Image (cartoon, coloured by chain):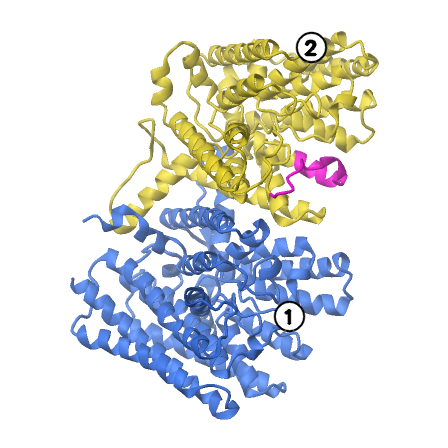
C-alpha cells in the first residue's frame, strides 16, 4: 500500500512540473496574441490541481520497497503524464476544432496520440496543418518533447538504477554515478543535477548558435527543443526545408550531439578522460555507422533519385542523422524518396544512437554486443571449448548483459511483428503498418506512405492511433518494463 | 573425401535422362559427361586416406561446400537443355530446388521438357531431408564422421535419434520419407491425376519444395487431391523422427512431443482466425473454410503452393502468412523457417526472464519435452534468430533496390530465407511474385539466402570465419 502511495506522490510531483511547463506556454501568446488564455489556464489548472492532490495526500511516503512497484511506477509515470499532456490538445480542439474528426472520442484518441508522441519524443503527428495551430499548442508540442527527452535520460541514468530496475542494464557500466566497483555511490540528486546542466547547456548553446545564424528566437527555441530531445515535431508543415543550408547543418549537429550518451558528454565536457574510455567503443560504433549510412544515402540520392551532388550531400547528411538519432526532423518529403532509402531508414532507426542519449531504437551498444556475440558464437562453434568472451571497451561483457540484450532484441522484434499485425487488423495498409510500427517503436516518428514524410497520422482509425501510442510507450521503455506488467506473474502475490 | 559427394549425382541425372524421350536427352547426357568424370576424378584424388577423421571445422566445410557445389552441378541441365540461357536463372532454379524453396523463374513450367520438370522435383526431393543426410544414407564409409556432419547440417536443433547408430537412424528417416512419397503418389493417382503430375507433385510436396509441373497444377486439382495435399503438407512440416513413430502407430509419443503440439495448435489457430477473417470480409462459406486449411498448411510447412485466391482478400491473411513464413515448421522436418522449436525455447526463456526481473536471484532452466536446454544452446538460438532477422532484412533491402515495395520485399526475402518460395500473398494483388524479371544479381542473392536458410546460417558463415 505504501508503495502505491509513493507512486502516486511521485506522479504528483511530475504532474506539477508538467502543469508549470504548460503554464509557461503562455509566453508566446503575449507576442502572437493568437491563443485563448483560458485554454491554457484550464489545462494547466487541471494538471496542477491533480498533481497537488496526489502530492499532498501522499506526502509522507518516500520510497519504493518492491521491485514490482518500480516497474509499475515507471510505466504509470509515462501514462499519467501522457494523459494530462493530452489536455491542451483536447481543450483547444473543443474551442477551435483543430482535429479533422469531429466526434469527441476520436478527438480524444487524436489528443492522446499527439501527447504520447510528444512525451516519448517520437514526433509522429496527427496534425496535417501544424501552421494553423495556436502558438501555445506549438510550444507545448515542442516543450513536451523537450521534457520527454530529459525524462528519458533521467529515467535511464538516475531513476532506473536507483529503483533496481535492470540491474544488469547497459547503463550501469557507463553511468556517471557508478564508480568502478559498480556501486551507485553518488546520490541520485547529483546525477540529476549533472544531466540537467548538460541538457540545459546544450539547449541554450544551440539556441544561441541558431539565433546567430539568423533565426528568430521562436523558431530557434522550437527547433532546439525538438531536436536535442530527438523528438522531431516541427512548427512548419515542411519540416526544416525552409531553413538556410547553414541552419540545416546546425540542426544536424544538434541531433548528432543528442545521440551521444549524456554520461559521455558530461565526462568529455569536464575532461574526465579516464572515464571517457569506458564509452569509447560504443561512441566509435555510433559515429562509424552514421558515417557509413550518410555516405550510402548520399550515393543513393544521387544515383537513385538523380539529385545533384550538392543537394544529395545536404539531404543525405541531415536526414540520415535525423534517422539514426531517431529524431524525425525532416528536410524533404521522405515519403517520395526512393524505396531502398526508406528501407535503409527503417534499419537505421532500429539501430538508433548511443545508449544513455535521448534517441530511441535498439541503441548502438546493443547492436554492437549482438554483433560481437554472434562472432563469438561462430568462433566457439568452430573451436568448441575455446574461451573468448564478448568484449566491450576492452573489458569482457557479463553474461547477464548479453542475455539482457538478446532478450530485448527478441522482444523488440516480436513487438514489431505484433504491432504491424494489429495495425493491419485495424485496416491500415501493410506498408503503412510497417512504417508506423517502426516509426513509433523507435521514436523516429514519420512512417511510410501517407503517414511518412511531410504527411501525418490523421487518416489512421482511432484504434490504430491508440495502438501506435502504446507502441511508442513500449519503445520508449524498451518493451520489457511494460511487458512485465502484462504477465500474470507480475500480479500474483 | 569431400568431393566424393559429387559422385552421387551421376545416379539421378542418369535416371532422368533415361526417362526422358522428349528431346532433352542430349542435354542430360552432356550433364553426365561433365559431372561423372569430375566425380570420378575427385574420388581418385581423394580416395586413399580412408581413416581420415572429421573435425568440427571440416564438417561445417563439407556441409557448406556440398550445398554450393551440388546446386552448381544441378544447374547444368537447365542450361544444357536450352531451357534458359542465363546462368543466374539456371543457378537460381537449381538452388531453389535443392533447398526446397520452390521459387521459379519459369512462370509456365509446362513449356519445359518433362524430364526437366522431373529433375526440378527430384532436386527438391533430394534436398528435402538434406544433402548430407542423403550422403550419410548412401555412403557408408562416412560412418565415423557422420554424427558431426549430421549435427553440422542441423546446426541449430538438437535432433532426436531414432537409433543409437546414426547411419541406421538416417536410413529409418529415409524409409519414412520414401514411404510418404509413395503414399502421396498413389493417393494422387487415385485422385485422378496423371502419372507425370502425381509423381512431380508427390516429390515436391513431401520435401515441402513447391515446384509445380505446370502453372495450373494446383488450381486444376479435384477437392480430393487438394485435401490429400493439405494433409501431406501438414505432415511434412512435422519432425521426420516423429513421423516414424506415427507409422509405428505410437500416437502417444507423437502427441507427447511439445513441438508437435505447438505446431498443431498454431496451425489450427491460424486456420481458425483466417476462416473468421474471410467470413467477416464477405467471402462465400465454401471458400472461406477450404482456403485457409490449404493455405496455412502450405505456408507453415514452407511448401508454398497457392490456391486461387478468395474473392475478397483480407489483410489478416497477409499478416498471418508473414508470421508463419518466419516461424516455419518443426525442427527436423523438411520445412524451413526459424523452426518452432527455437521459438519455443526463446519464448520460454523470455518468460523465465520476466520472472527473474522480479526475483533476481532465481535460477531457471528452459525445458523442452522435459529435457533441460543448456545455456550455451539457448544463446546460440538467440544468435541464430538475430542472424536470421538480419538476413531477411538485408534481403528486403536488396529487393527494394529492384523496385519492389517494402512489404513485398520483406515477404519475398523471408519466403526465400525460409525456403517457402513462391510469392506469399502480402497484398490484395497477390499474384505470384515474378522472379524472372529480377536482375541476375538479385537472383544470386536470393539463392544465397535460400542456402543460408537451408543450412541454418552457421555452417555457411563458417566458411567466412578465419581460422
Q: Nearer the viewer, residue A291 or A111?
A: A111
> In x, y percent, where is residue B240?
48, 18
Image quarter (top left, top right, bottom left or bottom right) of the N terminus of chain A: bottom left
The chain that hosts pointer 2 is: B
**Span shown in magenta:** B427-447
**Residue at image coords 61%, 69%:** A330
Residue A214 in the figure: left or right of residue A2: right
Q: Which residue is mark 2?
A: B11
Chain A tint in image: blue
Whether residue B446 is in magenta: the answer is yes
**Residue at image coords 51%, 55%:** A437
Find residue B125 and report its image quarter: top right
**CA gap, disc 2 to disc 1?**
62 Å
> In x, y percent, where is residue A331?
64, 70
Residue A281 visible somewhere in the drawing: no
**Residue at image coords 34%, 72%:** A191
Chain B tint in image: yellow
> In x, y percent, where is residue A64?
21, 63
> In x, y percent, where is residue B96?
66, 28
Q: Which mark is residue A331?
A: 1
Mark 2 or mark 1, whichever is nearer to me: 1
Callout 2 environment at 10 Å: few (<14), some (14 to 19), or many (20+)?
few
Amino acid at each position: 500500500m505504501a508503495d502505491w502511495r509513493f507512486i502516486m506522490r511521485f506522479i504528483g510531483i511530475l504532474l506539477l512540473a508538467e502543469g508549470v511547463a504548460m503554464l509557461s506556454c503562455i509566453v508566446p501568446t503575449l507576442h502572437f496574441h493568437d491563443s485563448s488564455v483560458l485554454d491554457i489556464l484550464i489545462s494547466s489548472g487541471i494538471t496542477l490541481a491533480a498533481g497537488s492532490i496526489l502530492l499532498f495526500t501522499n506526502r509522507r511516503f518516500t520510497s519504493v520497497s518492491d521491485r514490482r512497484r518500480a516497474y509499475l511506477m515507471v510505466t504509470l509515470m509515462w501514462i499519467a503524464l501522457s494523459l494530462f499532456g493530452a489536455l491542451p490538445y483536447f481543450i483547444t480542439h473543443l474551442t477551435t476544432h483543430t482535429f479533422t474528426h469531429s466526434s469527441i472520442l476520436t478527438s480524444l484518441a487524436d489528443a492522446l496520440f499527439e501527447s504520447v508522441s510528444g512525451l516519448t519524443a517520437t514526433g509522429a503527428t496527427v496534425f496535417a496543418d501544424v501552421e494553423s495551430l495556436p502558438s501555445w499548442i506549438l510550444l507545448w508540442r515542442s516543450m513536451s518533447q523537450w521534457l520527454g527527452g530529459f525524462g528519458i535520460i533521467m529515467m535511464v541514468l538516475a531513476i532506473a538504477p536507483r529503483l533496481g530496475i535492470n540491474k544488469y542494464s547497459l547503463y550501469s557500466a557507463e553511468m556517471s554515478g557508478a564508480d568502478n566497483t559498480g556501486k551507485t555511490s553518488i546520490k541520485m540528486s547529483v546525477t540529476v543535477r549533472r544531466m540537467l546542466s548538460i541538457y540545459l547547456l546544450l539547449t541554450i548553446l544551440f539556441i544561441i548558435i541558431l539565433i546567430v545564424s539568423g533565426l528568430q528566437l521562436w523558431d530557434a527555441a522550437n527547433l532546439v527543443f525538438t531536436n536535442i530531445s530527438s523528438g522531431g515535431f516541427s512548427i512548419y508543415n515542411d519540416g526544416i526545408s525552409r531553413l538556410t543550408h547553414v541552419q540545416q547543418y546546425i540542426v544536424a549537429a544538434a541531433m548528432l550531439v543528442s545521440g551521444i550518451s549524456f554520461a559521455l558528454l558530461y565526462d568529455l565536457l569536464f575532461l574526465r578522460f579516464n572515464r571517457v574510455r569506458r564509452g569509447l567503443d560504443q561512441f566509435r560504433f555510433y559515429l562509424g555507422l552514421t558515417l557509413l549510412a550518410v555516405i550510402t544515402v548520399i550515393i543513393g540520392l544521387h544515383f537513385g533519385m538523380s539529385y545533384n551532388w550538392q543537394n544529395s550531400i545536404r539531404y543525405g547528411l541531415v536526414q540520415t542523422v535525423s534517422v539514426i538519432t531517431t529524431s524525425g526532423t525532416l528536410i524533404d518529403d521522405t515519403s517520395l524518396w526512393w524505396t531502398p532509402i526508406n528501407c535503409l531508414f527503417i534499419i537505421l532507426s532500429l539501430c538508433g544512437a548511443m545508449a544513455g542519449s535521448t534517441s530511441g531504437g535498439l541503441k548502438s551498444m546493443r547492436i554492437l554486443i549482438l554483433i560481437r556475440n554472434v562472432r563469438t558464437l561462430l568462433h566457439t562453434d568452430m573451436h568448441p571449448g575455446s574461451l573468448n568472451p564478448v568484449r566491450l571497451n576492452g573489458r569482457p561483457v557479463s553474461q547477464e548483459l548479453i542475455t539482457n540484450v538478446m532478450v530485448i532484441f527478441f522482444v523488440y522484434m516480436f513487438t514489431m511483428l505484433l504491432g504491424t499485425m494489429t495495425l493491419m487488423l485495424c485496416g491500415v495498409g501493410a506498408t503503412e503498418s510497417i512504417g508506423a510500427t517502426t516509426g513509433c517503436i523507435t521514436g523516429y516518428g514519420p512512417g511510410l506512405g501517407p503517414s511518412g514524410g511531410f504527411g501525418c497520422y490523421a487518416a489512421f482509425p482511432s484504434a490504430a492511433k491508440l495502438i501506435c501510442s502504446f507502441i511508442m510507450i513500449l519503445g520508449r521503455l524498451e518493451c520489457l518494463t511494460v511487458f512485465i506488467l502484462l504477465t500474470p506473474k507480475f500480479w500474483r502475490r | 573425401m569431400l568431393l566424393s559427394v559429387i559422385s552421387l549425382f551421376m545416379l539421378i541425372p542418369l535416371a532422368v535422362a533415361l526417362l526422358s524421350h522428349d528431346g532433352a536427352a542430349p542435354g542430360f547426357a552432356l550433364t553426365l559427361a561433365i559431372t561423372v568424370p569430375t566425380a570420378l576424378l575427385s574420388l581418385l584424388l581423394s580416395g586413399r586416406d580412408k581413416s581420415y577423421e572429421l573435425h568440427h571445422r571440416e564438417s561445417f566445410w563439407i556441409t557448406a561446400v556440398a550445398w554450393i557445389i551440388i546446386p552448381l552441378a544441378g544447374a547444368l541441365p537447365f542450361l544444357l537443355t536450352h531451357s534458359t540461357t542465363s546462368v543466374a536463372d539456371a543457378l537460381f532454379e537449381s538452388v531453389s530446388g535443392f533447398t526446397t524453396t520452390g521459387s521459379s523463374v519459369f512462370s509456365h513450367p509446362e513449356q519445359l521438357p518433362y524430364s526437366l520438370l522431373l529433375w526440378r522435383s527430384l532436386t527438391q526431393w533430394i534436398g528435402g531431408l538434406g544433402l548430407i543426410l542423403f550422403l550419410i544414407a548412401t555412403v557408408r564409409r562416412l560412418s565415423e564422421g557422420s554424427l558431426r556432419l549430421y549435427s553440422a547440417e542441423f546446426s541449430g536443433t538438437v535432433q532426436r535419434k531414432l537409433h543409437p547408430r546414426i547411419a541406421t537412424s538416417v536410413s529409418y528417416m529415409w524409409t519414412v520419407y520414401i514411404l510418404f512419397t509413395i503414399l502421396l503418389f498413389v493417393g494422387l493417382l487415385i485422385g485422378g491425376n496423371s502419372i507425370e503430375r502425381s509423381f512431380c507433385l508427390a516429390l515436391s510436396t513431401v520435401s515441402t519444395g513447391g515446384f509445380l509441373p505446370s502453372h495450373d497444377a494446383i488450381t486444376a486439382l479435384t477437392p480430393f487431391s487438394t485435401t490429400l495435399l493439405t494433409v501431406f503438407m501438414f505432415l511434412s512440416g512435422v519432425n521426420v523422427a516423429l513421423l516414424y513413430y506415427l507409422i509405428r502407430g505410437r500416437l502417444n509419443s507423437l502427441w507427447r512431443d511439445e513441438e508437435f503440439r505447438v505446431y498443431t495448435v498454431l496451425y489450427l489457430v491460424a486456420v481458425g482466425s483466417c476462416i473468421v477473417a474471410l467470413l467477416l470480409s464477405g467471402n462465400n462459406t465454401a471458400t472461406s473454410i477450404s482456403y485457409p486449411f490449404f493455405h496455412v498448411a502450405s505456408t507453415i510447412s514452407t511448401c508454398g503452393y497457392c490456391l486461387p485466391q478468395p474473392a475478397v482478400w483480407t489483410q489478416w491473411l497477409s499478416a498471418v502468412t508473414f508470421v508463419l513464413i518466419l516461424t516455419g515448421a518443426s525442427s527436423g522436418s523438411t520445412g524451413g523457417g526459424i523452426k518452432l522449436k527455437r521459438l519455443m525455447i526463446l519464448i520460454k526463456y523470455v518468460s523465465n526472464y520476466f520472472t527473474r526481473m522480479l526475483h533476481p536471484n532465481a535460477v531457471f532452466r528452459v525445458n523442452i519435452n522435459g529435457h533441460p536446454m543448456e545455456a550455451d544452446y539457448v544463446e546460440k538460438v538467440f544468435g541464430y534468430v538475430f542472424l536470421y532477422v538480419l538476413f531477411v532484412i538485408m534481403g528486403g533491402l536488396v529487393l527494394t533496390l529492384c523496385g519492389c515495395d517494402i512489404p513485398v520485399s520483406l515477404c519475398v526475402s523471408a519466403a526465400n530465407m525460409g525456403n517457402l518460395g513462391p510469392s506469399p500473398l502480402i497484398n490484395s494483388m497477390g499474384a505470384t511474385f515474378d522472379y524472372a524479371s529480377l536482375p541476375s544479381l538479385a537472383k544470386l542473392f536470393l539463392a544465397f539466402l535460400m542456402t543460408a536458410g537451408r543450412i541454418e546460417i552457421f555452417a555457411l558463415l563458417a566458411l567466412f570465419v578465419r581460422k
